[in-house]
Amino acid sequence: MSFQLICFYAFAAVTVGAALAVVTLKSPVHAALSLVLTFFSTACLWLLADAEFLAIALVLVYVGAVMVLFLFVVMMLDLDLDPLREGFVRALPFGLLVAVVMLAEMLALIGVRSMDLQAPVDPAAAAGMSNTVWLASALFSEFLLPFEVAALILTVGIIAAIPLTLRHRTGIKAQNPSRQVRVEARDRIRVVKMQAEKPAAANQETSAP
Amino acid sequence: MIQFNPADLVTLRPELFLLGATCSILLIDLFLKAAQRDVTHWLSLLALAATAALVYCGIPAPGQSVPAFNDMFVSDGVAGVLKLFVLLMTGLVFLYGRSYLRDRKLFIGEFYLLLLFATLGMMLLVSAGSLVTVYLGLELLTLSSYALVALNRDSAASSEAAIKYFVLGALASGLLLYGMSMIYGATGTLDLAKIHAVADFSTNSPHRTLLAFGLVFLVVGIAFKLGAAPFHMWLPDVYQGAPTAITVFIGSAPKLAAFGMAYRLLEGGMGGLHGQWTLMLAWLAVLSLAVGNLFAIAQTNLKRMLAYSTISHVGFLLLGFVNGSASGYAAAMFYAISYALMAAVAFGMILLLARAGFEAEEIDDFKGLNQRNPWYAGIMAITMFSLAGVPPLFGFFAKLMVLKAAIDAGQLWLAIVAIVFAIVGLYYYLRVVKVMYFDEPADDAPLALPPDRAFRWSLSLNGLALLALGIAWSPLLEWCNSAFAAVAK
């Protein structure tokens, strides 16, 4: 067993364990932290497969940005998740049984027999360039269409987020920067000339509705 | 290093046009006031019509296919026919949904944009030439659909339906991707045509088990998207919970796209494993027929009943696949088209009866419809008879073709099971007809029809088309047959 294979099994075990922790841990913060660990060990797996760029991107984008945002949201929402988990323990034995049976079947059928599976030739190595260079050129030549469609999917995400979350509330006291800039001295203060003292009768008359 | 062939853009003309039109509508809609939303409505319909014209002009000769973008995209007869009907169904959704959405304050630009993006996703999905394009087209479609179901965010039922749809849809996507990864592992390529050439299921093949596992996950993913039992759990809740104008969409066009996806993946990619997936689909078909028809009997909510009826129709559709021949696929496509047209009228009738603050989604809401409005009662009766498969309506010939395909495949038992369940299904379709013609209406006043003339006309035409296509069904079937000319007989 080579060192690489040992590393693979170790990282794979950590990935699966951390992913299980995401759905089983009580505290949402701990679950989010386990998700960070899942991403991180997946990145390690990708490093083993010589996909350096993807591994770094996963750590930077998901661990660095997305998960931090997630943690903020989880901490701010202060969710009470206990009612959500009531059915979990009841369904757990059956779920575990199904999962174990599936795992056993798959190990028995593919895990053992496909050990000598010949991995497809690494296209980057075949082209004699580094993984990152190959990824960059493949993304904009061979995979141009899927790349653009992925961009469309992100656009749909943005469009969908707006009707689902934006609420127009009336009566909000918001500032209008354009009007603030255009304001002139006479809009801010109006000098009214009036008598210093008014007769009491006249005062009553003007204040009457 | 970077190769780019400008001819690829010509092949992708309809998709590029629709994308450009959608982005223009996105910008134009921003500057419209709520009262001017009709501009978005008509512009969207115009965009669909122009795209349909481009698709029609771009269909290659029967038996030929034009690949583009390194075989990521394939334009052929199958894709052409499916795209035309997908565009037609989306157009009908726009026409049917307008007054309903306006009454519920959902008449917003995002409805049009999300539907147009979903349409684009379906067009890419049915033209996919690679596993990547299949997956991305599917995601573009489903992501838009999740948002559409949740559009009425003040309704708890809609939100619940959207969450269920999202979670189960994500699960199905995961299963599909898992299967794709196994197939990639076994064949070393993502290209469907190359997978077809390489996939080897002979006993001495080293990748036999891996391919079989990948295939199982693919079939599960497809069954989820089609809504075949036992992967149908999301369907009734989503149909019932979604605003009806969106149920019209989910019940019609995506079924055509899911048929296209099944054809691309099963015949286009895994054609060599035909003997393996035939049996899986046969069992899915039997289960869908049983679950769909038996559960539909117990429903009192029309949307829910139609959801279970969808499951049974998916069972019929899958019969066409069992044969694995050109005529079988043509029968399945014919069935998908007929089902989409019938579902559009059935849900359109619910929209017609709905008013502000009132959803006509219970079967009892159709009581005595004949006394209140004989014309639309007649249209609904035609639809119900067609869904049940009564001659000489469209649905009958669609059922006949798939049954013939199953018998041609030597699966006589399957055809018999299907006929038995079709007769069971008659009960709940005819119950709607009985309620409309023989029950006393709760309210004698003539039906208050929505003022939208385009909606009423297109709904009537859609209903009459079921009759017309039932009488003159052969040109459409010929067309479906010629689309599959490239498949070995």
Image (cartoon, rainbow, N blue to C red):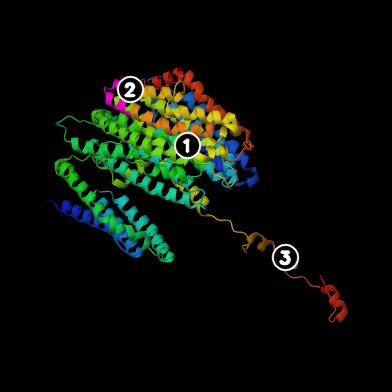
Q: Which residue is mark 1?
A: B119
Residue shown at 39% from the left, 65% from the top: A80
- The overriding secondary structure of the stretch rendered in magenta is helix
User: For the residues carrying marks 2 and 3, which lies nearer the camera in this image?
Assistant: 2
Residue B175 in magenta? no
Q: Say above or below: A196 vs A126.
A: below
Point out residue B440 in the picture as x, y percentages from the top left corner.
56, 36
Q: Quadrant of residue B262?
A: top left
Question: Foreground: A191 or B331?
Answer: B331
Per the model, the C-alpha gap separating discs 2 and 3 is 81 Å
Point out residue B480 in the picture as x, y percentages from the top left corner.
41, 22
Check disc 2 and give the amino acid type: Ala
Q: Is residue B330 left or right of residue B272?
A: right
Provide the secondary structure element on which disc 3 rests: loop
Q: Can residue B11 be seen?
A: no
User: For the residues carrying marks 3 and 1, which lies nearer the camera in this image?
Assistant: 1
Check disc 1 and give the amino acid type: Thr
Q: Earlier in the sequence, mark 1 or mark 2?
A: 1
- What's the magenta region? B407-417
Per the model, the C-alpha gap separating discs 1 and 2 is 30 Å
Q: Which residue is mark 3?
A: A184
The quadrant the C terminus of chain B occupies is top left
Q: Quadrant of residue B421?
A: top left
Residue shown at 62% from the left, 42% from the top: B37
Check disc 3 and give the amino acid type: Glu
| Mark 3 on the same chain as mark 1 | no
Please report contact status of discs 1 and 2: CB closer than 8 Å, yes or no: no
Q: Which residue is mark 2?
A: B405
Q: Quadrant of residue A67?
A: bottom left
